[in-house]
Amino acid sequence: MLHRYPKRVAIIMLILTALVAAFPLWGEAVFGTQANFMLEKLTLMLILALFAMSLDLLVGIVGLVSLGHALFFGLGAYTLALASPDFSPASMWWMLPLVMGVSASIGLFIGVLVIRTKGIFFIMTTLAFGQMLYYFISTSQFAGGTDGVFIMFRPSLAIGERTLVDLDNPYSFFYFCLGMLLIGYFFLRWLTRSYFGQVLDGIHDNEHRMQALGYATSGYKLIAFVIAGVMAAIAGMLAAMQYGFANPAQLGWHTSGEVLMMLILGGMGTIFGPILGAFAYEILLFIYEHATTHWPILMGLTIIAAVLVLPRGIAGLIIAPPWQRKRNNDDAPAAKKEQASEAVQSTTPRKEG
Amino acid sequence: MDLAFFSVQLLNGLQYGLLLFLIASGLTLIFGIMGIINLAHGAMYMIGAYLVYDLNLRLGNFWLAIMVAIPIAIALGLIIERLFLDTLYKRDHLYQVLLTFGLILVLNEAQRIIWGGDVHRVPVPAPFDASIQLTDNLQYSVYRLFVMGVCLALAGVIYWVIRHTKLGIIIRAGAVNRDMVEGLGINVRTLFTLIFSVGVALTAFAGMIAAPLTSIAPGMGDNILITCFVVVVIGGIGSIKGAFWGAIIIGMATTFGAVLIPSLASMVIYLIMAAVLLVKPRGLFA
Amino acid sequence: MQDKTILATHGLTRRFGGLVAVNEVDFDVASNEIHAILGPNGAGKSTLINLLSGEIPPSEGEVLYRGQSIQGKSMRQIARMGIGRSHQKTNIFPRLSCLQNCELAARIHMGGVFGSWRSRLRAHAVSERAMEMLETCRLTHRAYIPAAAMSYGEQRQLQIAMVLATAPSLMLLDEPMAGMGREETAQVTELLASLTDRYTLVLIEHDMDSVFRLADRITVMVDGSVLESGPTEQIRTSEKVRDVYLGRHDEEVTA
């Protein structure tokens, strides 16, 4: 894919980022005493956006539908919870590398097994491995069984005695999460537009052909699987810091299903779409939970509707708004044409220079 | 472990495996022929169990309850297939996963609305509410033996249909190459509806006859779904034979795992799956 | 076997269930020749190409490339040995631009993805080579268009450009002109003719005019077996081929 989008995408995303970043300025005016609660919700949304984005690398870019991505999310959470000392805060300087190292090794191990499978098989094996870790954790004494583990102290981010970011402060933690999300976004944006990303696109379109060209496609898929896992684990670590505990539910398959929902709501394969999806999902969840105790029915119907009516998600609406599509033209060719004309525009300077 | 205890475990494992086969065969048929991954398959197992629980209370007769429940389950399968899946055949697996995941949320919550969150039991029905003396010191529930018999009979019917009927030829061809079915000049729409209804009926029926053996609780479908995924991965997608042997392996592993290595019991089946994937990434019988 | 032989098969056989698709085929290709395979539908031509490129393993017999058996090697390894192939169905990456398609093909033989990352110079060389191949295939003006937006004929040309970009010593082309109009066919024929001094081509093609114009040697297959194999002139005038194939199966050939 060309991974280039109309200008309005950048404009909308910039405005939304600015709005979110400025929440401490307008939050209290709008939500009053609820502002702190809303800040926590917003922080959670940022974390889930990072989680959903990591899955987009697998599902949207490489075309590997994983139904076990929560495994890495939970892994990050449990690594933090179990490695944290009981009576003092851990240091982020070793905690973050530890989380990344653990998730990368487990991602490599599971990846080697699941990458060999394709299509439905991949879906089922990722799901099964996710459940394997779920049962392992929820029956293990050392991990607190079904109760999970509480985290007494959030890790600190300091040089010597000087605190860089006070992660216990909800406002600085909020900005810390926003920073991680932005780093994650720009990393994936760079990755998908790189040569490596081109190969991933090629695998998505036609893996067989890539092999005939001489590419070791399994290797590329494995690297993408590990990268996505590490990013999800970082999101899981942040989530555990936010909640103050690690719980088996964080790595169960319902969580994997939910993050897939965020992906479809936001629009997959676009990297920025899943961010919107995570926000949309959490906002919908918030509304439904307040409307009825039977909110899963509403959520289920929403997702069914999204699959049937809006398969390209919110991102699809922004990239190719319905009013811009030609009449008597179904949306796939219309989108292609739009992409084509944009590609020509965006690359003409490159051609001349 | 003495011989009697071992024999009981063997029978339990066999009975569980055969039950898994009923559910997994529906799952694998739907994968193999229709190319659809149906996450809501486990929910249909749950609905089967709850239907029998409910109808048993209303009608006062377990067998009558099953007779009434089967058509209801088939009707539900028909509605789901015609209403939702129809749009998904040509689309990516991702959308099938998401739509059927949405269905799980709806069906699980509908179950809560109708039957609540309590755990229920169904009494073992007459005339099977007894134990028989297999040897001097070995007793076994007659109902479990009955369940085994029914499952084996159904497995036999499925085997016969696949080996000896025109439908079976189509199913075998379709599992290898789905485009071929369309090339054979068969009405694919009708075939898909039939396969899906049979698949749903099998899993719902498994829920019904399992009702007196398990506790009927919310979320029971989710666990069985994932176990059946493991069965299908081990056996190979689309292969009924694979589903059968996969189910027996998993049934035995679960039963003996719980007795021999309780600390790892919940992980045993996944370890087996990982081992199979290492050696045969497409399953034992693919 | 001549010294110039680059590819040879001995008793190559492939069965699908009860059906024998390729039956004891002995076949060889000399370097820098265009070797065309002719035959009616179902004669086993595509299966033969799939066997030559290692996409499917033979039931019996072997394929020797530069005297080395390709048995047991993965498609990737075979591709890296220098056998490039195109497929009968259009087989490009629709969402990538025309140039990116070509770059993907070129990069793998020029240090790979990580080579391009390490060295800007190498990355530049890849783009240059990809552009060169597009020029050879007259696609320069389409370089920045998503492949999906190109015409069918252009997509087929891109496919040839991609095979070229992998710098193969042997190209296996499965009906490069299938479904093309007269003008496009003429263009591709010309393109292929211009390649002979640098490449060895094995070509499956239905378009008789092009085959007789291009090929140095022709192998005619019927029902999985070789009917006759020899220089183009010999095949053109062969009674056997005329009777069995050109005469009787004529309608199938043009169909």
Image: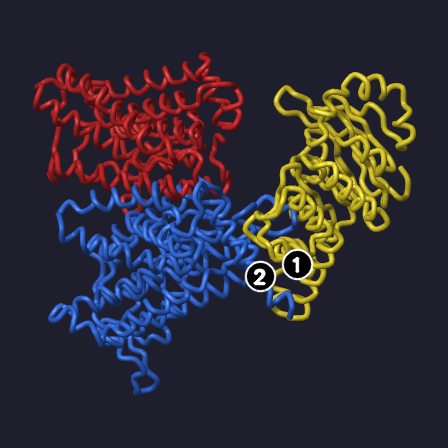
Chain colours: A blue, B red, C yellow
Residue C116: % across, % down: 63, 65
Q: A348 or A85: nearer the eye?
A: A348
From this viewpoint, is residue B75 visible?
yes
Q: B256 or A326: nearer the eye?
A: A326
Q: Check disc 2 and report its element: helix, strand or loop.
A: helix
Q: Is residue C233 left or right of residue A239?
A: right
Q: Is residue C36 left or right of residue A276?
A: right
Q: A22 or B151: nearer the eye?
A: A22
Q: A255 or B259: nearer the eye?
A: A255
Residue B77: % across, % down: 28, 27
Label 1: chain?
C
Tell me which corner region of the image, top left, top right, bottom left or bottom right, holds residue A19.
bottom left
Residue B216: % across, % down: 16, 33
Identify the residue at horizontal 44%, vertical 23% (top origin).
B188
The CA span between labels 2 and 1 is: 9 Å
Q: Vertical placement of C118 versus B158: above or below? A: below
From this viewpoint, is residue B13 visible?
no
Q: Amino acid at mark 1?
A: Arg
Q: Check disc 1 and report its element: helix, strand or loop.
A: helix
Quadrant the N terminus of chain B occupies: top left
Q: Residue furthest front?
A: A327
Q: Are marks 2 and 1 in contact (CB under 8 Å)?
A: yes
Label 2: chain?
A
Badge 1 is on which residue?
Answer: C107
Badge 2 is on which residue?
Answer: A195
Q: Residues within 10 Å of mark 1 (few under 14, many from 20)?
A: many
Q: Is residue C245 left or right of residue A15?
A: right
